[in-house]
Amino acid sequence: GRRGYGGWRALQQLGDRVDDPLVVKARDTFLSQNSLSVLGYGLYFGVMLTIALYNLYLAIIFRDRVYLSFTAYVLLFALLQMSLHGFLRQYAFPLRSDLDNQALRFLILAPSIASLLFSRRFLNTRQYAPLLDRLLLALIVIDTVLLVVVPFLDILTALRILNLHTLIAPLLAASAGIVCYLRGFKPARYYLAARTCFYASLCIFAVNNMVFHNHNFISWYGMMLGSLLEA
């Protein structure tokens, strides 16, 4: 939520998903803050698109699937942020909140699949951490099945599954990075350095959803900041 603002608040119901509290502000205050907010979002999505295009270029030049996996992850994660912050609903599904809700469920899982594929390929877990490699592969299969199953579940059940998944996936991937580094794969240090903040932000987001049911600046925008730091 947007905390720290005075005024009347009401919960806004969008389809079957409850979005952030609506905050009523003075016109000049709203316009000023909204301009800064739009600028910030524009910079974020612009940087993410640039990173994706650069990695796609590297994937084509070097014919390396690691870059391709990272490109897919960056694009899908940017779309997830667009859904979470209301841009997909505003521009893609203005009259269909149900499609926006289904898109959110898909976009929570799809970037995770791409990220886990990237982690397996970059860390070479099949060689350096065979057990964790099998666990990562199993989670990818589970995610793929959930892509089909989750749209047919009620919203509360789906959110519990997705929140639990958001907590498990980064912990498993981080564990793989640590094990690979300890077993002699030195590039894993760069993986851990780049992704530690991002994984921490995912865990904070998931815990806030499951336990506190409320967000502050760090839990709500931490994923965006973490994704920029890792890229």
Image: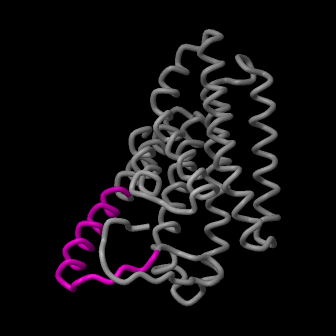
Q: In front: 131, or 185?
A: 131
Is 220 left or right of 148, judged from the image as shown?
A: left
Q: Is 229 situated above or below 87?
A: above
Is 119 left or right of 10, judged from the image as shown?
A: right
Q: Position of residue 44 (x, y in %)?
A: 35, 56
Q: Is 135 situated above or below 151?
A: above
Q: Position of residue 224 (x, y in %)?
A: 43, 52
Q: Quadrant of the N terminus?
A: bottom left
Residue 27: quarter of image = bottom left
Magenta highlight range: 21-44
Per the image, is 31 magenta?
Answer: yes
Q: Residue at x 57, y 76 (%)?
A: 18
- Residue 75 in view of the camera: yes
Q: Residue at x 54, y 52 (%)?
A: 205
Q: Position of residue 173 (x, y in %)?
A: 64, 34
Q: Residue at x 38, y 68 (%)?
A: 2
Q: Position of residue 145 (x, y in %)?
A: 82, 56
Per the image, is 87 magenta?
Answer: no
Q: In front: 204, or 58?
A: 204
Q: In front: 71, or 167?
A: 167
Q: Main secondary structure of the magenta part?
A: helix
Is 101 left or right of 19, judged from the image as shown?
A: right
Q: Is 4 situated above or below 96?
A: above
